[in-house]
Image (tube, rainbow, N blue to C red):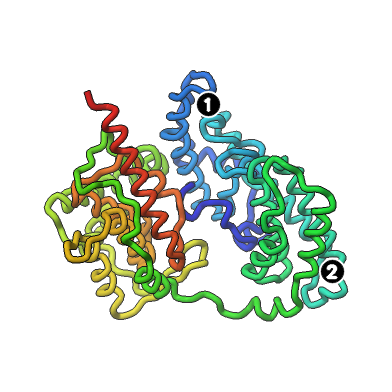
Amino acid sequence: MFVELSPRILTWDEVDPARHPFDSEAAARVVRSLGPARRVPRRPDLPPGDRALSDWGWEEARPWADAMTHALAEHYGRWVAGWRWAHDEGDFDGGPVGSWSRPQDSVTTPDETLDRVTAALREWLEALAARFEAYPLDLAGIDDQRILWDRTARNLILHVTDRTGCGSGWYAHCHQVLVWFLSRWGVPADDAEYLVEQVIGGRFESWTGPDPVLVEDIAERIAAGVRRDAAARAGEPTLPDHLKRWLAVRDAVPWHEAADSTGDTPVTPVRDGMAEEIRTFDAILDPGRGQGLLAALELMRADAARGARLDFALIQRWQQHVLATPGLPPLRSLPAFAKGGRERYGIAPDTRARLDSCLAESAKDTLRPLPLTARAARAFLDVCFFHPFDDGNARSALLTLLFVLAREDVALDSVQLLRRVSFHADDPQDALTLARYIDFHLRETRRRSSNSAP
């Protein structure tokens, strides 16, 4: 899934129908008006299980579905990301959507495909909201209403089991719905998340419906765990400066432990992974966006070939093409937000100088050697969390990562994992996970290159 558009991380504020108007009668027209609707890939006439069909699903259908998610989110808001959370082993495992499965199965003819998209958009959220509102609750009066909180939690669990069919990973959405329910009635999101995790914590299983006694126990524990003072604490400021957090984490990450299969030798792919990504995602979303990113990619590679120093001025030149601005896009002047407002990145007089200092560490250092995967991952995250531009920072971060590789004669035949996972500023393991993803793409690029050699 595209970065920050996974339904698993959506909050109730982001999906609450009362906050996000939706015209169901206009939905089909809106879906068909978006850029990806004009470029639906045609499913090849191949039998299920054919390897070529699987490859088509991964290389053509899935990027198209990602582009459609991105276009829908730009029009409606982040709540729409849940349209692909299908039952069982679909795009995200164990979701509530029955009209969509995996892209390789659900992308067929253009009309059928767009009808499936439209059918998946909103109904489930409307149904949940109605159940949340069935018994108006008051956090201040929790002691007198615990039986209502208990019964509502129980009914929601049963409703989710019915909607998902208790397939693979169904409990993740059940967890989310219970957090949404608590959030709707004033429990702070962090408290709700902690309470539900403590109560459920591995007690549900894939492909298995919960025992009635277990459902009763979980509902009772959730109701008993809600605190009366939660409403007062909900208004307390809780958002720190995640740039400062990243800089602290950055120094603590054991970068030398990063997986690295480069072996200090060039890696030449059989196909241009980034150009292919632009063709199957960005250009489908908007041809102008695709052209701009291709121009930035060409400039980035020329800079890498001449061994340019990585700093803000360099990525600023690429970003002019990414954003198609008449002049160089400036460094942002205000705090920035990402992940639906859950991360905030501060700004200070020395922000640019600190960014330049961090990016300079992407170069090979014989005195303090680090794996190439670690240096590329670190530079990517530097751009993500310094968030230097008002727009397009994810694209800038990806170009930065590819520049660090290209400067040492390494290229990839796919970048899908690098665009479809969200990383957090305050999690040291995320940094090593990104390095592992880069290494995976490197190993796969080498393998496919070796297999294609005469």
Q: Position of residue 165 (x, y in %)?
A: 72, 40
Secondary structure of the residue carrying tag 1 is loop
User: Front-most of 271 and 169?
Assistant: 169
Q: Position of residue 80 (x, y in %)?
A: 58, 50
Amino acid type, callout 2:
Arg
In the shown orientation, is residue 301 left or right of residue 418? left
| Residue hosting label 1 | 109
Instruction: Classify 10 Å Cα crowding around label 2: few (below 14), some (14-19), many (20 and above).
Output: some
**N-terminal-most mark, 1 or 2:** 1
At a point 44% along the width and 39% down the height, the residue shown is 63
| Residue hosting label 2 | 146
The quarter of the rendered structure image containing the C terminus is top left
Mark in front: 1 vs 2 = 2
Q: CA distance from mark 1 to mark 2?
A: 51 Å
At a point 76% along the width and 52% down the height, the residue shown is 157
Q: Are marks 1 and 2 in contact (CB under 8 Å)?
A: no
The image quadrant that residue 60 belongs to is: top left
Q: Position of residue 335 (x, y in %)?
A: 41, 73
User: Front-most of 170 and 45?
Assistant: 170
At a point 35% along the width and 49% down the height, the residue shown is 438
Q: Is residue 33 above or below residue 358?
A: above
Secondary structure of the residue carrying tag 2 is helix
Amino acid type, callout 1:
Thr
User: Front-most of 114 and 141?
Assistant: 141
Which dot marks residue 390? none
